[in-house]
Amino acid sequence: MELLEREIYKHYIEIIQGHSESRASRHSESCASCHSESRRDEESSAIQSQCFEDRHPQRVSFADLIDRYDAFCFDGYGTLYNRGDFVYPGAREMFAALRKAGKQLRLITNAASDVDCVLARDAAKRGFDFSEEETVSSGSLLKDLVADLRSGVSRNGPALRLREVYYIGRETGKNVLADCGITAVSPDAYPEEPVVAISSAKDTPETYARAVEILRRPGAILLVLNSDAWAPKIDGSREPVSGALSERLRRDSMCEANGGKGCSTFYLGKPFPAIWEKVRVSLPSSLFGGRPPRVIMIGDTLGTDVLGARVAGFDSALLVGRNQPASELAEDEAFLGIQPDYYIG
């Protein structure tokens, strides 16, 4: 991993640990997402030890896993498919075998490029017939977070109107905002409240500068609709994406005017708890004869898919060599304190 990438995922671990401690001490308080406050390194130790302790990942094929689990959760980009109509070799055949075996299947994606029904249709065009009900995206969590922000639940400050945001991302990502009653202002404008939303790394020097200016204002909020830091390309290379852009903005928002604290940041999607709550609700024990299901998450990223599965209490399988360079695997696992149950590839 790149150094910034490691730092981002370590920061996620610290946020999750802090969120868990907060929930333990304040049972009556609920939160739609995790608020990124600065945490001490030792606060992440419990999550890290849980992820790393006594784990000896096995190398397996997809076929080895079919009979071991009732439900299979898949990442999308980098796991099943990539840009355009590109599908990874063997992915369609594996998916068809799971359907034939009667397994419960879920698409768990940090893509916030459109609403879930569109993401499901796009996956079906590639040969993966996830229904809208089987699709859980980071963008689908925005509605609950917006409701909390409008009521004042999710921040230490007044409730927001949250009718406008400064948005950086794909044009179709505006559909996610619109579904919550939010308008993206034009790139040369300012929203009525200092709120910036990021769904992909589509910034220019001008939009980046405008976003930083907004985020340095008192009470500013950064909404990270896609928490992925890096993503694989079809040619095997990797590139920084929305999570990396958001981290740069978060750091650059720290200034004298806000006491060096910067903006309040809210993250949606993997690895944070809210997305896994939604997944669990979609897999009730009634689908499995009244018993808890055996669930596995299959993905290409240590800091989102594998960490997220551990947060959810699911097993995990990591596709090595896509978004996780094989030559850096052991070092990255040691740095983050994260290991999957299985390696594929």
Image (cartoon, rainbow, N blue to C red):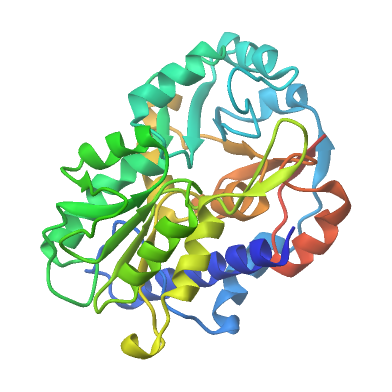
The residue at 46%/80% (across/down) is 38
Q: Quadrant of the C terminus?
A: top right
The residue at 56%/67% (across/down) is 13
Residue 80's place in the image compared with 178, above or below, is: above
Toward the viewer: 33 or 230? Answer: 230
In the orientation shown, which residue stands out farthest toward the top?
100
| Percent coordinates x, y for residue 31 in the rendering | 28, 62
Residue 339's place in the image compared with 59, above or below, is: below
All told, the count of numbered labels is: 0
Toward the viewer: 183 or 70? Answer: 183
Residue 253's place in the image compared with 165, above or below, is: below
**Residue 37 picture quarter:** bottom left
**Residue 193 picture quarter:** bottom left
Q: Is residue 211 visible?
A: yes
| Percent coordinates x, y for residue 4 in the rendering | 65, 66
In this picture, residue 12 sits left or right of residue 187:
right
Toward the viewer: 222 or 270? Answer: 222
Q: Quadrant of the N terminus?
A: bottom right
The residue at 82%/42% (across/down) is 58
In this picture, residue 46 sits left or right of residue 329:
left
In this picture, residue 335 sits left or right of residue 42:
right
| Percent coordinates x, y for residue 252 in the rendering | 47, 74
In this picture, residue 161 sits left or right of residue 234:
left
| Percent coordinates x, y for residue 181 in the rendering | 15, 43
Toward the viewer: 255 or 224? Answer: 255
Residue 99's place in the image compared with 338, above or below, is: above
